[in-house]
Image (cartoon, rainbow, N blue to C red):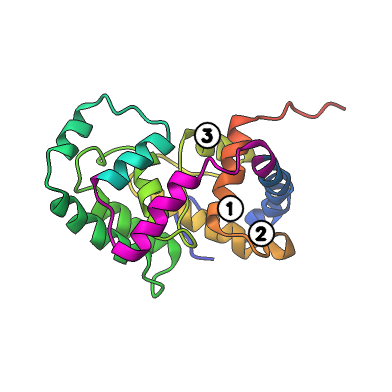
Amino acid sequence: MKKTTDTPADEEFAATCGRVWGVLVPARAGYLAGVSPHYDEVFHDVAQRTEHAGSLGKTDIAALVVWKRLSAQTRWVSALMSLPDAQVRSVTERAVTAVRDTALPPGEAARTGRGIIWELPGFRTGDALASAILTAAAPQRMAVYDQRVQHALDTLGLTLTHTPGRYGRYLQLLDDLLRHGGTQADGWTARDIDTALHWTGANPQPPATA
C-alpha cells in the first residue's frame, strides 16, 4: 500500500477494512435497490462518447452538471460556455489520457488528471464535477467524489483531508480498500465503492444501541 499523508498504519488500516466493508456491501445493495436503474443513463452516455472521442466537450460537461444536480447559474458556467469547444476538448483530452494511463497507480493518475482539469473555468476548487468528468473518462479506474462521500468517509473513520491533491488521495484510499478487501472486494471497482459511500452518506444509520 502506497503511503500518503492520509494513509494510516498498515495494521490500523487492515483492522478498519473489515468494518468498512461491512458497511459498503449492504450500502451498495441499497444503492442498487433504491436508485432507478435509469438514473445513470446520462453518465453512461457521456462515458460511451468519451470512449470513442477521447475527450469531453461542453455538451458532455453540461450533461454531467445535470447528472450531479449542480447549479448552472454560476459565473464559471458562463466562462466555460464562452470558450471554443475545441479548446475545452484539448484540455479534457489530456485529462482522459492521464486517467487511462495504466502505467500509473490510480491515485497518481487521478492526481494528474485533476491537475489538468484545473485549467478549465470552474475547476479550481471542489472535486464533484471534476471527478465526474474523470470517471466518465475511465469508469473502471476512477470514482466520483462529493460531500456525501466525504460524510461517509468521516463517519467510517477514513481520513481524507481537504488539502490540495484531495482527489488523488481519494483514489489512493479507494485503491487501498480494494486491495485490502479480500473476497468482499471481488468484482468491485472504485466506482462501485463511491456509489456505496454516496448511499451511506445520504442514508446515515442510527448508532447501534446496547
Q: Is residue 174 magenta?
A: no
Identify the residue under disc 3.
148
Identify the residue under disc 1.
192
Residue 120 in view here: yes
Predominant SS along the magenta part:
helix
Which one is nearer the viewer's eye here, 7 or 114? 114
Q: What residue sits 83% from the left and 26% below the top?
A: 209
Q: Is residue 82 above or below residue 206?
A: below
Rounded to the nearest angstrom, the CA distance separating label 2 from label 3 is: 27 Å
- Percent coordinates x, y for residue 145 in the rendering: 45, 43
- Percent coordinates x, y for residue 169 in the rendering: 44, 53
Q: Which residues are magenta?
A: 31-58
Return the mark for residue 55. Answer: none
Which one is nearer the viewer's eye here, 46 or 119? 46
Number of marks: 3
The first of marks 1 and 3 along the sequence is 3
Q: Given contact means CB atoms under 8 Å apart, are the residues at marks 2 and 3 in contact? A: no
The crowding category of the residue bearing disc 3, from other C-alpha atoms within 10 Å (few below 14, some 14 to 19, many at least 20), is some
Return the mark for residue 11. Answer: 2
Tell me the mark number nearer the camera, choosing from 1 and 3.
1
